[in-house]
């Protein structure tokens, strides 16, 4: 027994229910995830449609036509800035010389005179060489004067001697015909053109 007087709190009924201040245990609220998942699925679907389906339907980026228009405009401006040929100045065809009609070309070879006689001398040890070469000369259209063996100074090479510039054309033509490159302008011979066959000529 206590020494304090009894009060109303000491009177407890026999069939008493739970009394007093009690706190209910609240369950922790969790954020709902379905809205986030739903938005993510919608965004993914839109991205796939834009990447896979729209290019097949003909929807392209707007930057490509703009770049094409810019390139065409630059080409047109470049063509417009190119100088047009003047109507007063005729265009000369490429590859054609700009000579006037009055210009003349100088002849590169002396004229031929196949009335001049040609003498043929054999300066080698090959018998009959002068006669064979004389036949070639006569076949080329020149008359023959002398065909014989050479009795002068030994020759180092085959030569065609001609008397003055008037016979230079005959000497050049005979040199090409006989394969002789050494042409000599000489006045020591009486004949207009003299062919002396030197060593090695065949």
Image (spheres, grey):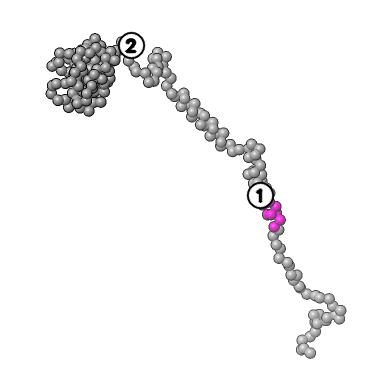
Instruction: Kindly report the secondary structure that dominates the magenta region of the rendered protein.
Output: helix
Query: How far, Cα to Cα, is label 2 from label 1?
Result: 83 Å
Q: Which of 61 and 169 is in front in this view?
A: 169
* SS at badge 1: helix
Residue drawn at x 16%, y 25% as measured from the top left: 155
Give the label on residue 67, or none.
Answer: none
Q: Which residue in the structure is indicated by mark 2?
A: 101
Q: Nearer the viewer, residue 177 or 16?
A: 177
Does 8 sit left or right of 123 as displayed?
right
**Which residues make up the magenta segment?**
33-41
Image coordinates for residue 54, horizontal then vertical, percent: 65, 40
- 186 relative to 73, above or below: above
Element class at badge 2: loop
Residue 141 sits in which quadrant?
top left
Q: Quadrant of the image for the C terminus?
A: top left
Left or right of 36: which side holds 175? left
Q: Which residue appears farthest toward the right when viewing the image?
A: 15
Instruction: Write the residue at 84% across / 78% down.
Output: 16
Res 44 label: 1
Q: State yes or no: residue 190 in magenta.
A: no
Spot occupied by residue 6 in the image (x, y as percentages of width and height)? 80, 84
Who's the residue at 86% across and 79% down the image? 15
Label 2: few (<14), some (14–19) or many (≥20) C-alpha neighbours in 10 Å: few
Relative side of 86 to 124, left or right: right
Q: Is residue 165 visible?
A: no
The answer to if 38 sits in the magenta stretch is yes
Between 15 and 174, the residue placed more toward the observer is 174
Q: Which residue is drawn at 83% across and 76% down?
A: 17
Residue 100 horizontal/vertical position (percent):
32, 13
Instruction: Give the label, 2 or 1, closer to the camera.
Output: 2
């Amino acid at each position: 027994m206590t020494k304090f007087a009894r009060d109303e709190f000491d009177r407890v009924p026999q069939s008493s229910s739970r009394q007093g201040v009690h706190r209910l245990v609240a369950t922790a609220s969790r954020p709902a995830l379905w809205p986030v998942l739903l938005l993510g699925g919608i965004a993914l679907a839109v991205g796939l449609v834009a990447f896979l389906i729209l290019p097949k339907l003909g929807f392209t980026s707007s930057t490509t036509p703009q770049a094409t228009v810019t390139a065409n405009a630059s080409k047109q401006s470049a063509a417009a800035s190119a100088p047009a040929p003047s109507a007063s100045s005729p265009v000369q065809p490429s590859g054609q010389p700009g000579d006037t009609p009055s210009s003349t070309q100088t002849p590169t070879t002396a004229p031929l005179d196949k009335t001049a006689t040609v003498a043929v001398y054999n300066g080698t040890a090959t018998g009959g060489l002068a006669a064979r070469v004389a036949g070639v000369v006569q076949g080329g259209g020149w008359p023959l004067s002398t065909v014989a063996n050479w009795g002068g100074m030994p020759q180092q090479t085959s030569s065609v001697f001609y008397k003055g510039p008037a016979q230079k054309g005959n000497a050049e033509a005979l040199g090409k015909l006989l394969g002789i490159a050494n042409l000599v302008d000489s006045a020591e011979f009486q004949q207009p053109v003299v062919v002396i066959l030197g060593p090695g000529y065949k």
